[in-house]
Amino acid sequence: DRERELPHVAILSSPGMGFLIPLAQLAKRLVLHHFSVTFITHTIDSLQITQNTILNTLPRSIKTISLPPISPQEIPPDAKLPTFVSITQKLSTPSLLHVLKTLRLTSTHRLVALVVDLFGTDAFDVAGEIGVPSYILYTGNFLALSVDLHLSTLDPESSEPVKMPGCRPIPREDLVTTAQDRTNQAYTWLLHHAGRYKLAKGILVNSFAELEPETLMCLKGEPSHLPVYPVGPLVQSGSTGKGDGPTPNWLRWLDDQPRGSVLFVSFGSGGALSFEQTQELALGLELSGLRFLWVVRSPNDKEACATYFGVKNNQQEPLDCLPDGFLERTKGVGHLGPLWVPQIEVLSHGSTGGFLSHCGWNSTLESMVHGVPMIAWPLHAEQRTNALILVEDLKVAVRPTAGESGVVKREEIARVVKALMDGGDEGKRIRSRMMRLKEACVKALAPQDGSSHKALSDVLRQWTSRVSLE
Ligand code: UDP
């Protein structure tokens, strides 16, 4: 029957906002192209509230399914994010199989693809079992994807920058942090997934051709011929579920600031600084004398995933970690945001003029899409690689230099904040380059001719053609 000929795509997101947000965005795009979509997540109690703010923005036609929780005892207590996420995904494959089988039997639409993120490759087997092809939405950029694919061939003894075809050289210390400690389970998991990427029918990448032309060409060309599709920037648009409630304090404050005057300071969904660095950052912002909106987190120097899921582990109250008298002295000039602010609304706000960011790839794309120049402050994962692209290649960010102890001192922080925000020549040049990137983002997504639009259309055609195949 005709109804059953409509294509249906199942999307499976790893726990973590950095996966959920771009995958949800893909889901919305698919609905616009007349696909039916089921969006599958994992049940992680502490993630539920923020996760729901995103899931609630999905169109009502998208069915959401949460897989049953796995036992917390299965996760080692010191697990890093890749380990946590990979174990959760792996142990959930039986329930995923059940969900997919049920969808096949009961949905009026034909299941044509399963899309997972970079930690979801164990689901390939499940999809294969019921004859559904698997795709990845890689939520980083092409350079990071190349690193993942080359990890197993890197010489651990060498200190030379890593050189891969089509890629800028990457100093060892700027490689993905998971690769810095090969004895950690997280590294084994990363290798496991990267080794399976080639099993995907297609790898959609949240970047665009004009941003990384050579790296893209090399991945697509000889000898690997990887089926990569640049479909980015996939970032949230429109409302992020603000709803009809009262205007939050941070937004009221932002509304009152002069145009382009505020530096937004945030380290993504889970990034946190050490106690000493938190204090130094506060004093540096104060010293700059410029306006800031800061999402302060409890100090934590470890790359454990606890902060990502809001798990309290004897955390101090964030405000207790600020220098004495800081709040009084910066009153009016600075505002401290709650633990979660809808970042896209801050970046699209006229008062925002700069973004001090941990350079997570979603945050980076969101800054580009809104033409907001950056201060690069990478912490974990592939964020140092992203910072290289931003600072050295695209020149749309400034990066503070850490002192010998590894801590960035207040004077250095004030220097970069002023360089970006104080109306000087360097800041103006950086800003105008970011504005050009903003235009490039619009072009890549333009209907018909945009490179990312065309790449996504190619994938959609593959999916649509499966309907008539069966
Ligand atoms: N985000 C947000 N509010 C916050 C923190 C994060 O809306 O307070 C969103 C942000 O806009 C981005 C995502 O969460 O879409 C974080 O992804 P990213 O890749 O930047 O970093 P991660 O959190 O994965 O390190």
Image (tube, rainbow, N blue to C red):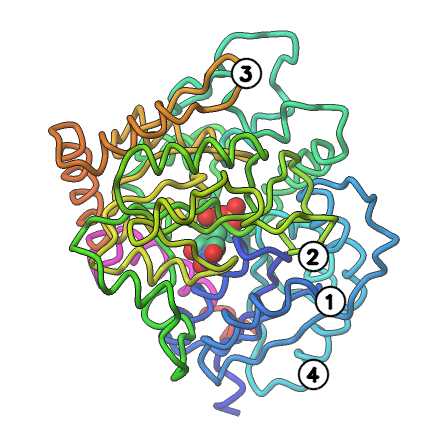
Q: CA distance from mark 2 to mark 3?
A: 43 Å
Which residue is labeled 3 in the image?
Answer: 405
Which residue is labeled 4 in the image?
Answer: 105
Taking 325 as reference, is 156 above or below it?
A: above
Q: Report the amino acid beneath label 4.
A: Leu
Q: CA distance from mark 2 to mark 1?
A: 8 Å
Front disc: 2 or 3: 3
Mark 4 vs 1, N-terminal side: 1
Q: CA distance from mark 4 to mark 1?
A: 14 Å
Look at 74% across and 62% down and name the residue there: 129
Q: Which residues are magenta?
A: 443-463
Front disc: 3 or 4: 3
Front disc: 3 or 1: 3
Q: Report the amino acid beneath label 1.
A: Leu
Which residue is labeled 1 in the image?
Answer: 96
Q: Quadrant of the C terminus?
A: bottom right
Q: CA distance from mark 3 to mark 4?
A: 60 Å
Look at 57% across and 75% down and name the residue there: 38
What secondary structure do most residues of the magenta stretch adopt?
helix
Mark 2 vs 3, N-terminal side: 2
| Disc 3 crowd, CA 10 A, few/some/many (<14, 14-19, 20+) | few
**Numbered circles on residues, count:** 4
Question: Circles 2 and 1: CB distance less than 8 Å?
Answer: yes
Mark 4 vs 2, N-terminal side: 4
